[in-house]
Image (cartoon, rainbow, N blue to C red):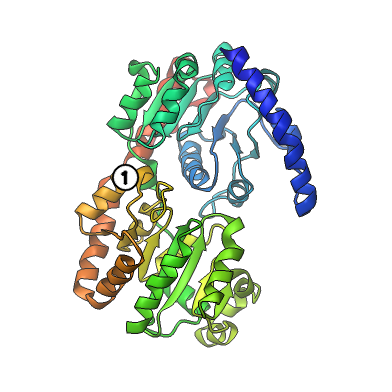
Amino acid sequence: MYRLYGALLVLAWAAVLPCQMLMTLLKRAAPSPLRERLGHLPAGAAPGGFWIHAVSVGEVRLALSLLAALRRRFPGVAVHLTTATATGRALASAGSGGAPPPESIAALPFDLPFAMGRLLDRLRPRAILILETEIWPNLLRLAAQRGVPVILVNGRISPRAYPRYRFAAPLLRRALPGMSLLGMQSREDADRIVSLGADPRRVRVTGNLKFDLDPPPDDRRGVRLRLGLEDGAPLFVAGSTAAGEERPVLHAFATLRRSQPSARLVLAPRHPENFAAAERLAREVGHAVLLWSRLAADGPEAARSGVASRQASPRFDVLVLDAMGILPAIYAAADLVFVGGSLVPRGGHNVLEPAAAGKPVLFGPHMENFRAAAEALTAAGAGFVARDADELGNLLLRLVSDRAGYAVSSTMARRVVEANRGALDRTLLLVEEVLAPARAPGLQAARP
């Protein structure tokens, strides 16, 4: 089975790699980190610490939160982080909340024996922590051969993804026993991973780490000054939108503007390749559009005083957030929030980030990836489902006009997040559990 998997992987990369190299040349982009994909360590990597793998931006945010907790619990131990996207790598390099980034960052090697084996032999990690449900059979097999524990962190298998996992069940039944412990978000996720071949004695329900993320920085006044917003002007933020959602969001915004002419929209596409299309569509429907990159080019001095900020900020109806890592601060300054990937069948994105900032959250019907969080917010009166553009517009009007109801929803949003914290501590217990039998003197857990 592993030989067949390896052969198929080699054939896939033989076809894909030349195309990737050609597209890199055509786009004049940075070259692909091929040496890292072949298992070579980047400069500064220190052996003997933790290896965390996080696919892209959402998982990297969780990884940085986990990294900070690991440093408190295991002081002095280095962390190597691998990721699969340029945006995730950039976020990891910036660190989080003033905390330093990982000691080294690289691309995940190809899941081939020579590449994964090379990295494992050179990094010699004490433990590997894999965010969400990234199952790489050769990594698991080779780590088990070397006695390196592997922990699945914040694991989930959505109802939408489950049939695809079942298709690969013969391979998963051989790979999953290579996991030392599996921390799953919910009992349903735990049951699904067991049905795919995980040892039930190694599966734990730890909850969702996203509840434990620090709330976004609350600089409402500073952000609004930077944007040049008038006092009392409603700010509507549509975060992590997917292709096909910009048009209904703009339609809902038009509904809001008929009642609140001073309202402004921040449109934040999930993927950088959609920035230009979002800008173009907003202009086509007649809005004055500003790019965040243009606003940021004015420099930090533009935000130091209210007068300077308003003079420096060109007037706009729609601001396209063409940068990564800014959205949490924008959420904190928002009055109205819609979280994308939910009006189209993409499974939805993180509704807990705006909820932690005390914002009632609007989203579409496709929330499979965040079903539990969406249901908790809805049940508490802090989450609102819009099935189409008209419903989204009506919900915006309802929230902006009912200030007492808005205040209750805001309070309940925070309470839902606070009530579900604890996954981070339970995850750290998993790490301690796998390290306890052979904890080295330099890896003693720090106690309060």
Which quadrant would residue 165 be assigned to in this image? top left
SS of the residue at dot 1?
helix
- Tell me the quarter of the image containing the N terminus: top right
Most foreground residue, 77 or 428: 428
Residue at (27% x, 71% y) in the render: 399
Q: Is residue 333 above or below residue 81?
A: below
Residue at (32% x, 68% y) in the render: 390
Which quadrant would residue 206 be assigned to in this image? top left
Where does the image place residue 435, in percent across and percent down from the top left? 46, 21
Which quadrant would residue 163 be assigned to in this image? top left
Q: Is residue 168 visible?
A: yes
Q: Is residue 181 left or right of residue 127?
A: left
Q: Is residue 445 above or below residue 145?
A: below
Most foreground residue, 83 or 435: 83
Where does the image place residue 425, in percent across and percent down from the top left? 36, 36
Which residue position is annotated with label 1? 371
- Tell me the quarter of the image containing the C terminus: top left
Most foreground residue, 94 or 87: 87
